[in-house]
């Protein structure tokens, strides 16, 4: 990771302590302008992931083919589509989580701040420190709330004040007030929604640059879902977020850009391969999609 | 109209709900299952009761202390199990020191590190087969390896505690590996993913999350292993335990390990072969001792496990 100067910069800014409000506002100023002038020619945002013609294979089976899409900084990018269309597989490319699956391999080019993520020189452990992940089912460690948050920084060799970091992470995940008196209790004892926010706190404790979310609300009730969505809108000022969701309303509510995946069934073999049909601003995908399949899906005629 | 319509439905519902029949097959099955449990327990209880009843006069007349501190003897009134207890504890020590760390380590490598290739699958299947190999075969292996193999003989001292302990350690190794691997396999993938997801290395994932989660299961396997090691007789008979006498008194530690020995189950075998009627009681008392020592060792292991569990 020779070109790590850039993401480090982000990390450093995130590290600034409780000047949170002012800092956020300061950062937010120009961005709001961008958001409002959405329909004007795009003010070019920094590209976090430049995905070029990426395909996923499990052995000989091609699960996802030819995905090309840029992911922009401080945006929420939603991946939608029917079950089995490869959204999750694609998402897990972004922090090399698929490395853990035997026989999985990737073709194409995946640049993260210009660095090829799959370059043999790149350490996947370091990748996952910078690119955090929140999973479909809340999966806190069977340890205390405190240790859940502190584990990541601890193994990363964090030398600052751990108590402060844990508190700050729980604050950002909007969980602090609910757990501040029971940090030593097990993370498993929390409710589902709280567990998921704990997982978000755990993900941001390592001060990542990007957060990947794999259907983070699918196991949660509407109130807990709303809290997570509010949180995502809050977090995107600091991080870039890529989210897989089955819930189209959710994609429409929170995301800036949406990629619609679909699954192609090969006539001879019956193999199912996912691919991206359309990738655009969320507004466009939901109001004026250019592909018939996208329109059918987002209007509920299919899937 | 509406009312009669409702009551007609109600009538049909009532008829259907109240048509409760006796499920003959279900009841018979349940009785059969209960019977199976009862018979298994009954056999065990009768066996234990008989052993304890036979052993009772020995403990009553001579006292527990006298019996467990007396040496092997061909006179029933003086025969004891001291060497057997010591020998058995030595053998279990070999298992704890050699088989358990090796087995757990091997299981961790197989489950967490090794890639799923044809070779690993062959190894996996063979470990399972090894667990089913009769103990006497391990005894023969022990003779070939530790007694007859010239290079090792100076170390093991022939038919000695070292040879017996090593043989039993090899014998239980597959059991340790299998139970540990099961425990590791039961750790949810989501926990591993969560740890990898925050940038843990494989070693950190294993050390901080997989092992603590699997520890109770691994400990349970360990306890089963100790029980097995305690009860194993056949290989020890081949390796000279039955006829041997533990050197007593002045011999140093290493000499003791290289010397002749016996173990509780082999002692049971030895006493049971004697024709004198009084040895029936001695045999039973030896069995009781074996069971009690086994329970003590298991209880220690369980206490250790519970204490370890509480830390997480």
Image (tube, helix red, strand yellow):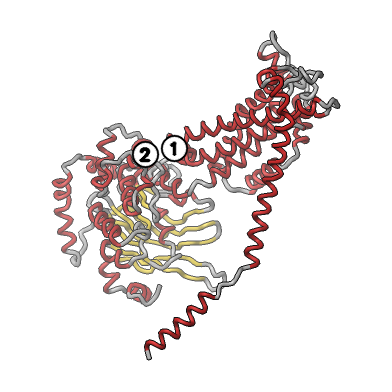
Chain of the residue under the numbered disc 2 shown in the image: A
B291 or B171, nearer to the observer: B291
Q: Quadrant of the C terminus of chain B?
A: top left
Q: Residue at x 44, y 81 (%)?
A: B10
The N terminus of chain B sits in image quarter: bottom left
Q: Would you say A227 lies left or right of B216 here?
A: left
Q: Secondary structure at mark 2?
A: helix
Q: Is residue B65 above or below residue A2?
A: above
Few, some or many C-alpha atoms within 10 Å of disc 1 (few <14, some 14-19, many ≥20)?
some
Cα–Cα span, label 1 and label 2 = 9 Å
The residue pinned by badge 2 equals A151
Q: Residues within 10 Å of mark 2 (few under 14, many from 20)?
A: many
Which residue does the image show at 33% across and 72% down from the upper left?
A: A298
**Residue placed at 54% from the left, 34% from the top?**
B302
- Asked if residue A285 shows in the view, the reply is yes
Q: In the rendering, at what x and y percent does residue B305 appear?
A: 51, 34
Question: A223 or B302: nearer the eye?
Answer: B302
Asked if one can make out residue B270 in the rendered structure from this viewpoint, the answer is no
The reply to whether label 1 and label 2 mark residues of one chain is no
Numbered tag placed on residue A20 in the rendering: none
Using the rendered view, name the quadrant where residue B9 is placed: bottom left
Residue most toward the top?
Answer: B250
Tell me where residue A191 appears, x and y as whole percent.
Answer: 34, 52
Name above or below for residue B228 compared with residue A36: above
Residue denoted by label 1? B208
Q: Residue at x 26, y 56 (%)?
A: A227
Task: Determine whether label 1 and label 2 are within 8 Å by CB.
Answer: yes
């Amino acid at each position: 990771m020779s070109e790590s100067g850039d993401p480090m910069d982000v990390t450093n800014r995130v590290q600034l302590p409780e000047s949170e409000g002012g800092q956020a506002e300061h950062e937010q100023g120009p961005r709001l302008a961008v958001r409002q002038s959405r329909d004007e020619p795009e003010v070019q945002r920094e590209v976090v992931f430049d995905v070029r013609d990426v395909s996923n294979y499990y052995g000989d089976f091609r699960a996802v083919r030819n995905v090309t899409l840029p992911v922009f900084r401080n945006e929420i990018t939603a991946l939608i589509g029917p079950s089995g269309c490869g959204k999750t597989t694609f998402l897990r490319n972004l922090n090399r989580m698929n490395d853990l699956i035997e026989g999985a391999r990737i073709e194409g080019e995946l640049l993260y701040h210009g660095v090829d993520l799959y370059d043999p020189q790149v350490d996947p452990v370091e990748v996952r420190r910078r690119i955090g992940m929140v999973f479909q089912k809340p999966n806190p460690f069977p340890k205390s709330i405190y240790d859940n948050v502190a584990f990541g920084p601890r193994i990363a060799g964090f030398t600052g004040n751990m108590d402060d970091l844990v508190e700050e992470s729980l604050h950002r995940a909007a969980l602090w007030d609910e757990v501040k008196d029971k940090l030593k209790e097990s993370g498993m004892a929390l409710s589902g929604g709280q567990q998921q926010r704990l997982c978000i706190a755990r993900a941001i404790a390592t001060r990542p640059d990007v957060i990947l979310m794999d259907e983070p609300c699918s196991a949660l009730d509407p109130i807990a879902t709303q809290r997570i969505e509010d949180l995502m809108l809050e977090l995107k000022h600091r991080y870039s977020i890529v989210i897989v969701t089955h819930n189209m309303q959710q994609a429409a509510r929170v995301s800036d850009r949406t990629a619609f995946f679909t699954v192609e069934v090969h006539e001879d073999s019956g193999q199912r391969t996912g691919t991206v049909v359309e990738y655009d601003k969320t507004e466009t995908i939901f109001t004026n999609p250019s592909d018939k399949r996208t329109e059918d899906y987002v209007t509920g005629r299919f899937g | 109209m509406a009312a009669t319509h409702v009551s007609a439905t109600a009538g049909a519902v009532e008829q259907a709900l109240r048509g409760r029949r006796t499920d003959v097959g279900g009841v018979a099955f349940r009785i059969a299952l209960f019977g199976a449990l009862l018979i298994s327990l009954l056999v065990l209880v009768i066996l234990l009761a008989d052993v304890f009843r036979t052993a009772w006069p020995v403990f009553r007349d001579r006292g527990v202390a006298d019996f467990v501190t007396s040496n092997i003897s061909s006179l029933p009134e003086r025969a004891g199990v001291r060497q057997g207890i010591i020998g058995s504890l030595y053998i279990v020590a070999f298992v704890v020191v050699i088989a358990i760390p090796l087995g757990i380590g091997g299981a961790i490598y197989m489950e967490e590190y090794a890639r799923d290739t044809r070779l690993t699958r062959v190894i996996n299947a063979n470990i399972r087969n090894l667990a089913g190999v009769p103990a006497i075969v391990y005894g023969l292996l022990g003779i070939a390896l530790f007694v007859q193999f010239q290079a090792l003989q100076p170390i093991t001292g022939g038919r000695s505690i070292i040879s017996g302990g090593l043989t039993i350690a090899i014998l239980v190794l597959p059991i340790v590996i299998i139970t540990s691997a099961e425990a590791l396999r039961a750790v949810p993938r989501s926990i591993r993913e969560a740890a990898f997801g925050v940038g843990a290395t494989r070693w950190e994932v294993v050390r901080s999350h997989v092992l603590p989660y699997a520890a109770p299961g691994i400990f349970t396997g360990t306890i089963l292993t100790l029980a097995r090691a305690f009860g194993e007789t056949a290989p020890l008979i081949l390796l000279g335990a039955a006829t041997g006498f533990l050197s007593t008194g002045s011999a140093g530690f290493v000499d003791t390990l290289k010397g002749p020995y016996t173990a509780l189950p082999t002692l049971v075998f030895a006493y049971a072969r004697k024709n004198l009627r009084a040895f029936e009681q001695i045999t039973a008392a030896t069995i009781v001792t074996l069971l009690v020592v086994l329970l003590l060792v298991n209880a220690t292991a369980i206490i250790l496990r519970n204490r370890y569990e509480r830390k997480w």
